[in-house]
Image: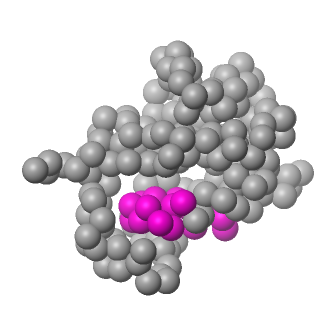
Amino acid sequence: MPAPHVHDHSQDDVRVYSLPYAVPELPVDLQAVAALYDAAIDDCKACIQERLEPVADDAATTASLVGWACLIMAETYGGFPNDLLAHTSPESAAFNTMASLYQRTWGSGSPTEVVHPAAVKLTWAERRTACVWALGLVLAPDPYEAGLPSVEDCCPECAGQEDGDILIVTDNGITLIPNNPV
């Protein structure tokens, strides 16, 4: 495991998307979402796993991440893609529960507010799985073209971990298939 370090892209141009905004009615931990996103940008697997916990611990924060992923998908594809919900697996079930609510009520409120009722009903493990799936979509709206920056460029403390082009999201976390397989 790498030495303790910080992933912070709040002041550089590495973040592809602006973070979701606060919703006054819901106590969302946007700092936890930002920390998770920044660790994922750097492809630091140990930090991703660690930073998933506070996001999954709270239904409102989970809703913020999932709603953000839904918004990115809708903006990328001009509406929420039905094909995304057609993918059914244990890894996608919790995300699909919230995303289908987003799809049915698109434009009726902030993405966080729209998916929050579904997040509240999920167990912690289901919220965590939904967070993993949502994070994968935030990182790569086209999961076949992740195009993440090199770990050595973003996080020297994580050097030696794999960098890749293809993103695979499972209940065990995020895996990148190396762009130069041996």
At 84% across and 40% down in the image, what residue appears?
120
- Residue 1 visible somewhere in the drawing: yes
| Main SS category, magenta section | helix
State the residue lying farthest toward the right. 25
Residue 91 falls in image quadrant: top right
In this rendered view, identify the residue nearer to me: 4 or 155: 4
Q: Tell me if 47 is positioned left or right of 23 in this view.
A: left
Q: Position of residue 5 (x, y in %)?
A: 47, 82
Q: Tell me if 93 is positioned left or right of 181 in this view.
A: right
At 49% across and 74% down in the image, what residue appears?
8
Q: Which residues are magenta?
A: 30-49
Q: Position of residue 77 (x, y in %)?
A: 46, 27
Q: Position of residue 12 (x, y in %)?
A: 42, 72
Residue 151 falls in image quadrant: bottom left
In this rendered view, identify the residue nearer to me: 125 or 52: 125
Q: For the N terminus, which image quadrant? A: bottom left
